[in-house]
Amino acid sequence: MKSNVKKGIILIASIIVLMSCRSEEIIDTTINGEQALKGNSTVASLIQRTSLNDGSTDNIIDNANCFTVQLPVTIQVNGLEIIVDSEEDFETIEAIFDEFDDDDDKLQIEFPITIILSDFTEISIIDENEFEDFLDDCNGENEDDDDIECLDFQYPIEVTIFNTTTEQTTNIIINSDKDMHDFIKDLDDNDIATIQFPITVVLADMTERSVENLDQLEDLIKDTEDDCDEDDDFDFDDDDCQNCTQEQVLDILIDCTDWTVDKLELNDEDLEDNYNGYSFNFSNDGTITAQNSTDTFSGTWSASGSGQNITVVIDISSLPDFNASWNLHEIEQNVNENKVDLRLPNDNRLRFESTCN
């Protein structure tokens, strides 16, 4: 009898040891693997900050960096009613604002609306007063905030979560920033996650980068988080050339002919009327010609840079109003009408217009 009891005790002890070894083996394999992700790690915090809801994307509507307005939303723009269904409709609002340079642009939101906070919490707003209360809680223009906007994840991303207490394994598919944010938020001390690498991220210049492990991902986010203008201001049209290229401005200025001066403002003076009847032609050899009914003026021009940092240099010795290193602000292309908008500090601007198709 005692022998059987002793054998039973030994058997139970052996099972316990085996189960313990199995659990430790699973945990060690997960923790020691280079893809192991813990909720309290630095890389987890960086991932969550990258997946926050970027409140600046709809500043043309709400002037708020800490939340977005849920679409669709109905607004009044300079007296015109617009139903905004998608971010593409922001261009319609901007076009109305840009129609006249000297008017007082007004936008009114029709309530009730729903706003989405940086952590994707949705809140119903019933009127203007409640909306203003949330606006007051937001950071001002270009103030530091938690969200990282210079890098985006390309979805879907597959993740395996192992719970060290229950030894349960769960597989999930992450399809959006909200999914990613909630996944990191819900990781507890007993969870170890394994991201199925490689994954692809998109940088601010729209280039794609393949990432092979968590160490690479952590380094890449740290290296790029300050590499772009997060556009956390309320100037709705200061990023119109975010994706412009040097080749684009060269092509349009050369291919279109007989450019006229649609706008020229220097030191708070409107000078475009001084150049009524002038036409400008840009050649691919770097020369520029301006002429009116009686005279012809010759000079040089060039373009360099990319995105929001394209510089157009004009030098016509007999027309000093045009001579500067202008920053390309916007290229507007429509049927039979093209505009190239150039800017200098202190609201100085030059806008050429051509009726070429």
Image (cartoon, rainbow, N blue to C red):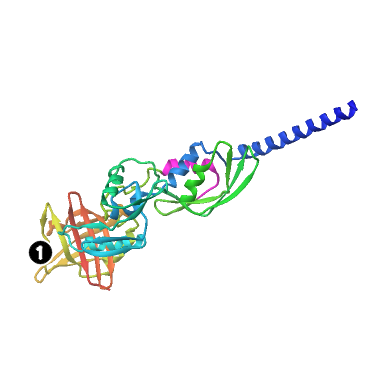
Q: Residue at x 65, y 36 (%)?
A: 28
Number of residues whose C-alpha sits closer than 10 Å to that of mark 1, classed few (under 14), some (14–19) or many (20 or more): few
Residue 188: give x, y in percent of width and height: 54, 38
Q: Which residues are magenta?
A: 210-224
Is residue 14 at all visible to an observer of this figure?
A: yes
User: Which amino acid is tagged 1?
Assistant: Asp
The answer to if 212 sits in the magenta stretch is yes
The answer to if 314 sits in the magenta stretch is no
Judging by the rendered image, the residue that carries numbered circle 1 is: 273
Q: Main secondary structure of the magenta part?
A: helix
Q: Is residue 323 above or below residue 224?
A: below
Q: Nearer the viewer, residue 220 or 160?
A: 160
Question: Left or right: 350 with respect to 14?
Answer: left
Q: Residue at x 16, y 57 (%)?
A: 104
Question: Left or right: 132 with respect to 177?
Answer: left
Residue 356: give x, y in percent of width and height: 25, 72
